[in-house]
Amino acid sequence: MDKNINITLKVWRQKGPKEKGAFETYQLKDVSQGSSFLEMLDILNETLVNEGKEPVVFDHDCREGICGMCSLYIDGHPHGPDTSVTTCQLHMRKFNDGATITIEPWRSAGFPVIRDLMVDRYAYDKIIQAGGFVSVNTGGVPDANAIPVPKKDADLAMDAAACIGCGACAAACKNGSAMLFVSAKVSQLALLPQGRIEAARRAKAMIAKMDELGFGNCTNTRACEAECPKDISISNIARLNREFIKAKLKD
């Protein structure tokens, strides 16, 4: 049965990208363990507003683990100490009474802080844009079985497509690498016939854009895989490397 707990929060506060940030400490009492982590932050902000103080800025949208907006670094882990969940799916029952919880924004050169716990994740959108589109016939609705795809490939493509682009992989990586994200987006198309037409151009363009935006290199520590809320496999990184090498050999 869930109970109420008292917690101490150490929250990163930063007024803007050029400002110097620092941790501020807050006390919360009688927080229900049945509440989600974001609901707990809502309670904190309501308390701060009632005291005439500035609320903590943080990103959120769907609160269903789909959009990837709730990008918080909690107690040394992207999205917190629970596994295979986003921050909005993390519940306070994961924390003990009297716990001190440290909350930070993503720490990556590719994700500059906007304010407090909110970072600019537009870099991932730019990488996807660099990947471009797929060439398809958009006339009539094609028959579902017109292009046969082996079930194994379809399953792998769907697993890769589960990536929500939250940025946890880059935040977890000691080099701030976005390779897991890029490899997932390349794999979901590289495994399917529809994605083969622009495959070579896509792999080169997305990797070039990733490098341009300041993300680091992969050194196979697998921190990205361990912290990914959607359990994206690093086998996708191997596939991305193969796609990139094949594209370069064609050149």
Image: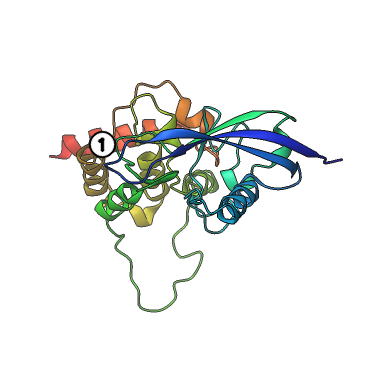
- Residue at the farthest left position: 251
Residue 199 position in % (x across, y down): 28, 48
On-image quarter of the C terminus:
top left
On-image quarter of the N terminus:
top right
Question: Residue 237 appears in which quarter of the rendering?
Answer: top left
- Residue at the farthest front position: 52
Which residue was labeled with disc 1? 244
Q: Report whether 184 appears left or right of 135.
A: right
Question: Residue 241 appears in which quarter of the rendering?
Answer: top left
Residue 17 position in % (x across, y down): 30, 44
Residue 98 position in % (x across, y down): 71, 28
Considering only vertical position in the picture, is 179 above or below 39? Answer: above
Task: Give the camera-side residue of 213 and 137.
Answer: 213
The chosen color scheme is: rainbow
Under circle 1, the secondary element is: helix
Q: Residue at x 33, y 46 (%)?
A: 16
Q: Residue at x 43, y 20 (%)?
A: 221
What crowding class fits label 1: few (fewer than 14 Cα within 10 Å), some (14-19), or many (20 or more)? many
Task: Give the camera-side residue of 227 and 46.
Answer: 46
Q: Is residue 241 in sight in this rendering?
A: yes
Amino acid, disc 1: Phe
Q: Report whether 44 appears left or right of 115.
A: right
Considering only vertical position in the picture, is 245 above or below 185? Answer: above
Considering only vertical position in the picture, is 66 above or below 206? Answer: below
